[in-house]
């Protein structure tokens, strides 16, 4: 296995559902990020094998969301390399707006679809149009084919009957399920989840997690920033605990969540055990 | 409620009206209050407007016969007033859209052009702009017909004010929308056209309505360039007959009625749009 | 009627600076044999103003129908002294007239852009206007008449010394009150009474309307005798004061920056002289003013 810097993720190992011999499909290598003089990410390296689910946990402000946003260049990293499905983009903050760089990033984003905390559905478009806008106009899929794909994923998230609804008429849980379907309709190589249940009413969290668990068990590749420890325990191949811009601890959920070795991980998890084992950290 | 009442000596649940009846009572009380408000509002207007009318009539300067004699001529100016206003607001919207895109452009030349446009037009009187477009452009060999010059001047002027409205509207589209679009791989142009502008337009439509109502009144300034609209007609007849007082008063009333009419229209449009945002 | 808005002057000046001094059509009117009574045959020069209107079969004339009896719009028909003069001029060219009603300031500023071909609007010939417009010989002369409100009790011109007098914005009347009126080759009129303060309102006629409304910020009003008499006829509370203070030479104007007007002026000059000589103008003056304003010695 060769990598750009000779860097590798020491915790990476093929997951339970990874096809034999497949190389990592996502590599975040030595990601550094400054906001002004604030050093938010201090060299994060993370590799994901196909069909793995990886959860990133940590306190707010620890850099976990920033790392995820660096993975598809919603934030331009200050340094580092992102590789997804053989598309490799090196951080280039000085030429972030160059045509060539932006095109590379676009290619990367088509392969790594993000699900946001705030859903970010397009309120002026019906559900079906939210789903097919990018496949048709970005990927160039024919409209009929995009609609067929979109309807398949609406079925998967259980919202086929909301096909022609406007987002404004949906509950938060339904919106997030539509957002997941929108990401899936792009048929990406990896799904990025940025605290997908944090903005939800507690009674609506379950329906979203159920969809995510189903995806994980079906072999989707997922990188999930979350406070849902139960979900991490149930669905993750590996859990990464991030503290002050560095991975403090990583490994299988049984190890990181139930027998943490790092003192900081223990302290972080103590907040959840009081509430009878991890539900919502919000 | 029943439990609470049962615990209170002297509050006999059986003596209280059934909950359904209370709901009905509340509804009726609200309706009565609404009707009272509407009546008092109407009465206030009748008293104030009537008072003003009486005060004006008491001057002895109102000659209904004189106005009646010229009424068809005056009212014949309304179609042109409305045409100029409608055409100008449409073109102003176009100028504003282009101006707003320029004002958010990262290209310094485009940003510079848009900023100069806004600064220059907002910093000079509309009447000078109308005169300039009508009388000074011909020096460059550009002779616009009067109606085109008038509409162009009004829309160019309003476009500059509306540029800032549009820019604010574009910037009011939540950041998450831009992130979602770019995360889906959309280009900036695609994002602007398909995601941002449709939402921005909804945000600015009430403001466009306000601008249109202001436009109806400012359209009086095209009387300057030989367009015989409502204001030109009243002013000319008034000056010719030593009756500026009557004719300007009449013009004011007609403009007022027009703006009331279009304000109601605008309110309905806003309500409908608010509903469509909630449609299932 | 004889307004020349400061705005127009400023814009003209700006235009002169911006667009260079010499307007393309600027020319001096050619001299013709004076006193000719015989009808003058038009001699059009290709590209000239006369050529343009003859080819169009019509002549576009600017007018402001807020000024009866010179110009008014009655039941959709333009009528008045200026209207008759313009129609007669067109008739002598075998043309029909089309009317335009631009703001007075747009007319006196020049730079018409061909929107109309000539102004028959009782325009006073002044050196400033002559920079951007070419003039015909005067077709009539209105006396400038001072009036006073009945409220003031003033009945003589001397009585207005030290008082405030109203005139239309940018009119030649305002210029006279401030001592700046100059007819160029036509000379300078007599000075105003001593110590007069001049104020302006947007239109000449607004001054008299103020008296009617009960405002007496000023005691005097200077405008044309026809306007004063019209106001008195309409029952406004004012009286004529003294004899006319001066005569204004009023002429047809064409735009220097338009098509070369040498051919038009060369035809117009003897034509106006002919209209004086054959009594046409006198008859029109009698019809609209009930008096003869067509001579410079009244």
Image (cartoon, helix red, strand yellow):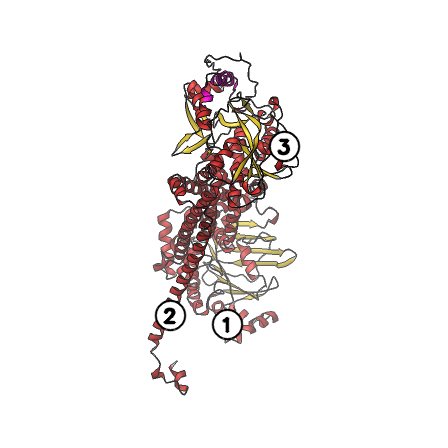
Q: Nearer the viewer, residue A238 or C231?
A: C231
Residue C211 is covered by the magenta coloring: no
Q: Residues within 10 Å of mark 1 (few under 14, many from 20)?
A: many
**Residue A278 marker:** 1
Classify mark 1: helix, strand or loop.
loop
Q: Residues within 10 Å of mark 3 (few under 14, many from 20)?
A: some
Residue C271 is covered by the magenta coloring: yes
Which residues, given as a range, are shown in magenta?
A: C253-282
Q: Chain of mark 2?
A: B
Gap in angstroms between the C-alphas marked 3 and 2: 76 Å
Q: Is residue C73 left or right of residue C168?
A: left
- What percent of the width, then of the height, locates residue A266? 58, 72
Q: Is residue A174 above or below residue B6?
A: above
- What percent of the width, then of the height, locates residue C135? 54, 22
**Residue C192 marker:** 3
Gap in angstroms between the C-alphas marked 3 and 1: 99 Å
Residue at the bottom extreme, as displayed? B9
Which mark's residue is nearer the viewer, 2 or 1? 2
Q: Chain of mark 3?
A: C
Q: Nearer the viewer, residue A32 or C196?
A: C196
Q: Which residue position is annotated with label 2? A: B29
Q: Is residue C34 above or below residue B120?
A: above
Classify mark 3: helix, strand or loop.
loop
Gap in angstroms between the C-alphas marked 2 and 1: 51 Å
Which mark's residue is nearer the viewer, 3 or 1? 3
Q: Is residue A104 above or below residue A281?
A: above
Q: Is the magenta region chiefly helix, strand or loop?
A: helix
- What percent of the width, then of the height, locates residue C115? 47, 28
Asked whether the viewer can see residue C284, the reply is yes
Q: Are marks 3 and 1 on the same chain?
A: no
- What percent of the width, then of the height, locates residue A160? 35, 59
Q: Chain of mark 1?
A: A
């Amino acid at each position: 296995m060769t990598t750009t810097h000779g860097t590798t993720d020491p915790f990476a190992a093929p997951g339970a559902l990874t096809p034999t011999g497949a190389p990592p499909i996502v590599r975040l290598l030595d990601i550094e990020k400054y906001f002004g003089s604030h050093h938010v990410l201090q060299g994060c390296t993370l590799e994901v094998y196909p069909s793995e689910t990886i959860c990133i946990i940590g306190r707010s402000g620890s850099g976990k969301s920033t790392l995820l946003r660096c993975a598809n260049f919603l934030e331009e990293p200050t340094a580092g390399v992102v590789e997804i499905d053989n598309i490799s983009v090196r951080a280039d903050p000085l030429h972030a707006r160059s045509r060539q760089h932006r095109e590379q990033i676009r290619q990367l984003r088509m392969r790594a679809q993000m699900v946001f905390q705030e859903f970010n559905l397009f309120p002026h478009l019906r559900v079906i149009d939210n789903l097919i806008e990018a496949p048709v106009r970005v990927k160039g899929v024919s409209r009929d084919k995009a609609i067929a794909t979109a309807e398949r994923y609406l079925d998967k998230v259980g919202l086929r009957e909301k096909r022609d609804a406007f987002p404004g008429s949906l509950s938060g849980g339904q919106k997030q399920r539509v957002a997941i379907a929108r990401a899936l309709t792009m048929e990406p190589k990896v799904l990025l989840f940025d605290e997908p249940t944090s903005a939800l009413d507690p009674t609506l969290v379950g329906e979203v997690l159920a969809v995510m668990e189903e995806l994980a068990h079906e072999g989707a590749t997922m990188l999930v920033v979350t406070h849902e420890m139960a979900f991490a325990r149930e669905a993750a191949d590996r859990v990464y605990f991030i503290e002050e811009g560095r991975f403090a601890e990583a490994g299988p959920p049984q190890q990181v969540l139930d027998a943490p070795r790092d003192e900081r991980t223990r302290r972080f998890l103590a907040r959840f055990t009081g509430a009878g084992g991890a539900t919502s950290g919000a | 409620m029943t439990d609470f009442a049962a615990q209170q000596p002297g509050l006999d649940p059986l003596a209280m009206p059934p909950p359904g009846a209370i709901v009905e009572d509340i509804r009726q009380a609200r309706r009565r209050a609404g009707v009272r408000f509407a009546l008092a509002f109407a009465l206030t207007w009748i008293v104030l407007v009537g008072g003003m009318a009486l005060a004006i009539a008491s001057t002895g300067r109102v000659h209904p016969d004189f106005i009646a004699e010229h009424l068809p001529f005056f009212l014949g100016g309304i179609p042109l007033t409305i045409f100029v206003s409608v055409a100008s607001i449409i073109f102003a919207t176009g100028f504003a859209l282009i101006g707003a895109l320029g004002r958010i452009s990262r290209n310094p030349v485009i940003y510079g052009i848009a900023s100069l446009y806004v600064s220059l037009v907002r910093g000079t009187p509309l009447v000078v702009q109308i005169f300039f477009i009508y009388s000074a452009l011909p020096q460059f060999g550009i002779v616009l017909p009067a109606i085109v010059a008038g509409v162009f001047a009004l829309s160019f002027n309003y476009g500059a004010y509306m540029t800032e409205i549009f820019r604010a509207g574009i910037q009011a589209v939540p950041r998450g929308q831009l992130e979602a679009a770019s995360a889906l791989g959309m280009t900036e142009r695609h994002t602007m056209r398909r995601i941002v502008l449709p939402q921005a337009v909804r945000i600015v439509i009430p403001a466009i309505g306000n601008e249109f109502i202001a436009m109806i009144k400012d359209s009086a300034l095209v009387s300057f360039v030989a367009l015989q609209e409502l204001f030109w007609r009243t002013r000319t007849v008034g000056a010719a007959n030593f009756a500026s007082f009557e004719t300007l008063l009449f013009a004011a009333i007609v403009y007022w009625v027009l703006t009331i009419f279009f304000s109601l229209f605008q309110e309905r449009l806003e309500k409908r749009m608010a509903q469509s945002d909630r449609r299932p | 009627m004889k307004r020349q808005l400061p705005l127009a002057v400023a814009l003209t000046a700006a235009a002169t600076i911006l667009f260079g001094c010499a307007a393309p059509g600027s020319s001096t009117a050619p001299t013709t044999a004076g006193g000719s009574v015989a009808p003058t045959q038009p001699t059009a020069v290709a590209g000239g103003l006369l050529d343009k209107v003859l080819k169009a079969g019509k002549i576009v004339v600017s007018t402001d129908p807020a000024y009866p009896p010179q110009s008014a719009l009655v039941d959709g028909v333009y009528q008045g002294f200026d209207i008759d003069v313009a129609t007669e001029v067109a008739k002598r060219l075998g043309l029909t007239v089309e009317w335009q009603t631009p703001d007075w300031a747009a007319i006196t500023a020049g730079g018409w852009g061909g929107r109309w071909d000539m102004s028959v609007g009782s325009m006073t010939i002044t050196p400033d206007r002559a920079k951007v417009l070419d003039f015909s010989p005067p077709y009539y002369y209105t006396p400038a008449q001072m009036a006073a409100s009945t409220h003031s009790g003033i009945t003589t011109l001397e009585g207005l010394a030290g008082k405030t007098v109203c005139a239309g914005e940018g009119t030649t009347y305002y210029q006279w009150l401030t001592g700046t009126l100059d007819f160029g080759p036509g000379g300078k009129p007599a000075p105003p009474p001593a110590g007069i303060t001049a104020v302006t309102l947007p239109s000449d006629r607004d001054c008299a309307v103020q008296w009617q409304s009960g405002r007496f910020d000023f005691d005097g009003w200077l405008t044309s005798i026809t306007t004063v008499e019209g106001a008195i006829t309409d029952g406004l509370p004012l009286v004529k004061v003294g004899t006319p203070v001066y005569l204004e030479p009023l002429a047809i104007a064409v735009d220097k920056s338009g098509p070369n007007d040498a051919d038009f002026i060369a035809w117009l000059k003897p034509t106006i002289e002919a209209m004086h000589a054959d009594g046409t103008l006198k008859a029109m003056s009698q019809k609209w003013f009930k008096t003869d304003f067509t001579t410079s010695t009244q």
